Amino acid sequence: MMAESTSFEPSPLGGNGDAEYHQPRPRKPTRIDLLKPQLSEETIVNRLKETSSGLSSGRTTPIPENAPPSVKASSSARRQIRAQQRQRIFPTIEYVDRVSHFDPSSDYRDFRGFFVLFWIGLAIMVITTMLRNLKENGYPLFIRQWELFTEKVWELAICDGAMVASTAVSLGLHKAINQKYFRWSGVGMAIQSLYQALWLLFWVTYPFIRDWSWTAQVFFTLHLLAIFMKMHSYAFYNGHLSETLRRLNDLDNPNNASKEEAYRYPHARTHLHEIPQSPSHEKTEDSEKVKLAQLRDDLAYELASPLGRVSYPENLTVYNYVDYVFCPTLCYELEYPRTASVRYMEVLYKTLAVFGCIFLLTVSTEEFILPVLDESAIRLNQTNSILDFILILSETIGQLLFPFMLAFLLVFLVIFEYILGAFAEITRFADRQFYADWWNSCDWLEFSREWNKPVHHFFRRHVYSASRGHMSRPLATTITFFISALAHELVMGCITRKFRGYGFIAMMLQMPIVMVQRSKWVRGRTLLNNVLFWCSMILGLAMVGWKMFLGNCVRLLLTFVCRCVRYMCLCEATLDVLPRTYFGKEDDTSPCDYSIRCEGRNLPMVDDTPLL
């Protein structure tokens, strides 16, 4: 009777209709490895003991002690399966030792739902903005920056194409080197370096001469820097291969050829004392032959592509160069891994995403950045207290924290996820990891490695590794940051039309911050370092908005100082120390009538300089 009672299964057609309460319909879990606990061997053994010690269900016969091992194994397997599949009458919850998804020790990494929530939030922001504008102005959107996007757009397109096409000089140079008109080491490197310097100088100054809008100039400058790095990598890597081929050909006559070991460039983790030094001159005849054969193998291996289908100089073709220009990478290789085919729907999706992100970026700028800057400029011009001046600046930075963080995320997505992804799909470029989980960074060095992998690979290969053979790691790292800081200052100069050094200083300040974060008091505290990273990131992005109109703030501050000086009735000669250009026009107001003009707020205004 007990055995019959334990096998109660209610019929779904019962008259009371309560079958679903006794045996609810199971749901298929999406992550079985997380939701279904794994039974340990000890648990299974204990359950088997409990089963063997209790009453038999009639489905098995106890195994005698002297049964063969095969029979015992089969019986044990059946009992394990029954122990795992046995269900109770009332549904039970199995509780095991496990952590939550957000626990630092959790291995769960699938948070795509938050990515979807991010886009839903942006959609809600756009809809509410359009409804508010429709109610207040009668138009859903009012974009003041439209002229910035359309001004001289055809000139921008033509110059951008000419800029890219002008890098093909490197291909002609290496064809001449391959024809043995001259060598790379010496003449070829000098020609390429001189051409790169003149090329960079011309294309950087051209937008300033033509007075382009800051949006067109920033786009052109970013593309210019990317193409410059592409050209440098193509020229210097092929130059390295040309010298390697020359050495390999010279080994056909080993009596006159150099037999020095092939120079291996240091990697990121190579210490200075680990760099191979000059080999010993004590050589026997047998060791000479072995080293000569090894040298031939090393040089021949260097001339072949990573996939083994292309060798230098077979890569010196127009098709190979054009393909490299369109590939989303800054480091040249003879061959890249490719996907099987182009997914045209994916190209269409990423293209639409690019324009969608630009639209969202424009709306967020119009609604949450430009009004704050305009209002702050007016309030700063009207303030009469140094405390109010500081409070207005602090309030402005606080209001720009979230908008600039949103702008940064949109720019990151449009470049590294959609533009590079679209070009990767068009060229069938298989390596799509253009960034890593930079949001988990604990210091700025880790962030620089993770958030922009193409640029990181270029600097590690052509700047850091090239410098490590001649200097220590800290000095090579400083030089790498120095060159990167110059590039950041160039971009900031294109936005503000003034080179004040803000981008350079902000970039170089990362070095002492990294030293503090890697000290013994802070190092290893992952959560604290990540919090500090995000705080500095958000605050730094908001400071960018303040730096964009810092020149106006300086003039406003000087205006405020002049008011204070006049209010204290200092002599007119003291006022002559300050340049009149800060006030927009000559001002012959005497100290005596300043209080009268102050009451009417009829004060000299600063120049009407646009903030963006």
Image (tube, rainbow, N blue to C red):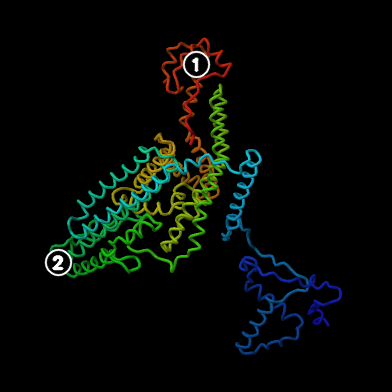
Q: Please tell me which residue lies in front, 114 or 273.
A: 114
Residue 267, visible in the rendered structure: yes
Left or right for 375, reference 168: right
Considering only order in the chain, which callout, 1 or 2, is on the residue closer to the N terminus?
A: 2
Q: Which residue is mark 2?
A: 253
Where residue 200 sits, quadrant-wise, is: top left
Describe the element under mark 2 as helix, strand or loop: loop
Secondary structure under tag 1 reads helix
Q: Residues within 10 Å of mark 1 (few under 14, many from 20)?
A: some
At a point 60% along the width and 88% down the height, the residue shown is 70
The reply to whether residue 504 is in sight is: no
Relative to 86, 499 lies left or right: left
Q: Position of residue 26 (x, y in %)?
A: 71, 71
Residue at x 63% of width, y 59% of height: 99
Count of number-bearing discs: 2
Of the 4 image quadrants, the one containing the N terminus is bottom right
Residue type at mark 2 is Asn
Seen in the picture, residue 608 relative to 533 is either above or below; the reply is: above
Measuring 60% from the left and 55% from the top, which residue is drawn there? 114
Q: Can you give x and y, in whole percent of width and height, for residue 408 in the image?
A: 51, 46
**7 left or right of 95 in image:** right
Residue at which label 1 appears: 565
Q: Do the CB atoms of the residues marked 2 and 1 lie less than 8 Å apart?
A: no
